[in-house]
Image (spheres, grey):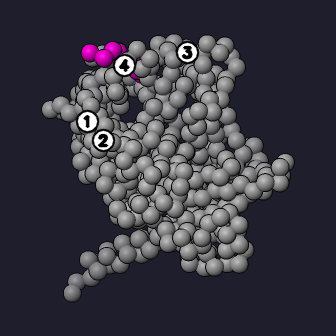
Amino acid sequence: MAAYLSRLHHISLHVSNVDKVAHELVSRFQFNVFAARLTDRAKQLALRRGSAVFVVNERPSEAPRRLNERQDLNCLYGAHAHYPVDTVSNVCFEVEDVQRASAALRDRGLCEFLQPPTEVADDSGRVTFSIIRSPVGNVCHTLIDRSRYQGLFLPGFHQVRTDSETAGRSQCPITHFDHITYACPRSSTAHITRWYRDTFGFQRFFIDRNEDVDEGYVLNHNGIGLRLTAMEYWKCSESGITLPFKDEQEPDCKFVIAESLPQQGRNQVDTFLDQHRGAGIQHIGLYTEDIVRTAQTLSLSGVQFFSPPPAYYTEVGKQDEIVAAGHDPHALSQYGILLDTDIHTDTDSQRYLLQVFTKPIFREDTFFLELIERRGATGFGEGNIRALWRSVQAYMENEERHETERENKQSTPS
Ligand SMILES: O=C(O)C(=O)Cc1ccc(O)cc1
Ligand SMILES: [Fe+2]
């Protein structure tokens, strides 16, 4: 392994209207702006809910005119990249030694650097960071060492005081990023998993007991053409020599690669690739300790969720399953929350997974968020994946039909 990751630090969004997206995250998703960097050339806002931190950056409206413009610190800690649509494109990890990690990656020729190791300081201390390109579309990774920094967030950002984050906690107990799902072109998964393994020591984990190591988890019938491959990183300590350890205090974030399969027609992964103009982060799962309460709070503030067909909640088996898990089918159906049960074969105990997807966040049908509550289940349930897939698919097909109708109307002279 070349670089040791200590933890996920934040995820960056690059959007044309920072205030609009930040407002959406605050007023609807109950995030709090806690730090900002505002200069005449940059607008960067950091928002938090639990340990989940987003940095919303203003993306330049045009490509840089001079090559060295990329080097300026317009978008500090993020690559100053022009991108044609709003996008979530940087997953920033803390590492113990940026210089060493970067040198190791460079020596092994594993990745392209968008920014070599760079130091930034203010009154509260200093940080070092570098930025590398990932093999997934426009996704890059900032590697940062903030062990010599005592400030609230990062040098260059000032503190923004808002109502205490704890105020809304009981109504919206989102604690951390649970997983990041990439939408990728066909046949790209093997290359991506290999890169993450060789670069950061990511390990595969199986979504399904019968999953094939090379094929991943393939859903290829009843209109679903999806290949899912999941991997996670080991939180590592360089002082721990070579043995990685798992820190139980802070759950790590999983990564899922979604690839569409050709046999079942156009689908949501293809739609993402088209509208996003390439591979990238399709959705992020926000972990909540109480999904019903969180969905209720977010729904009251205007967040819209995808819902499965109403029949999902009245199917005899599903109703019993929901009740057995201690939930009320009516409450779940109100917000479109899905439940999957899996029996733990060793202990015979049941483990549950509850999930719901939000509608896309940007103008395009690209990035969306997910709420997820785990009751012992650590992976992803097949039943939920199918139901989530169908609810998104129905919405996208409807959107595409409306779009065609609008185009037809415009081209028909009245
Ligand atoms: O189940 C999940 O949360 C996943 O992340 C799997 C997944 C990936 C892509 C889709 O379009 C739908 C489901
Ligand atoms: Fe997900």
Residue nearest the viewer, comparing 390 with 269: 390
In the rendered image, which residue does mark 2 sit on?
33
In the rendered image, which residue does mark 1 sit on?
160
Tell us which disc is closer to us: 2 or 3.
2
Kindly state the secondary structure of the residue where label 3 is placed. Answer: helix
Residue located at (66% from left, 13% from top): 241
Amino acid type, callout 1: Val
Amino acid type, callout 3: Ala
Residue nearest the viewer, comparing 403 with 301: 301
In the rendered image, which residue does mark 4 sit on?
150
Q: Residues within 10 Å of mark 4 (few under 14, many from 20)?
A: some
Q: Which residues are magenta?
A: 123-130
Q: Is residue 92 visible?
A: yes
Is 353 positioned to the left or the right of 289 in the image? right
Amino acid type, callout 2: Val
Quadrant for the N terminus in the image = top right
Are the two marked residues, 1 and 2, in contact with CB atoms closer than 8 angstroms?
Answer: yes
Tell us which disc is closer to us: 3 or 1.
1
Q: Is residue 247 above or below residue 297?
A: above
Kindly state the secondary structure of the residue where label 1 is placed. Answer: loop
Q: Which callout, 3 or 4, points at the residue further toward the start of the chain?
A: 3
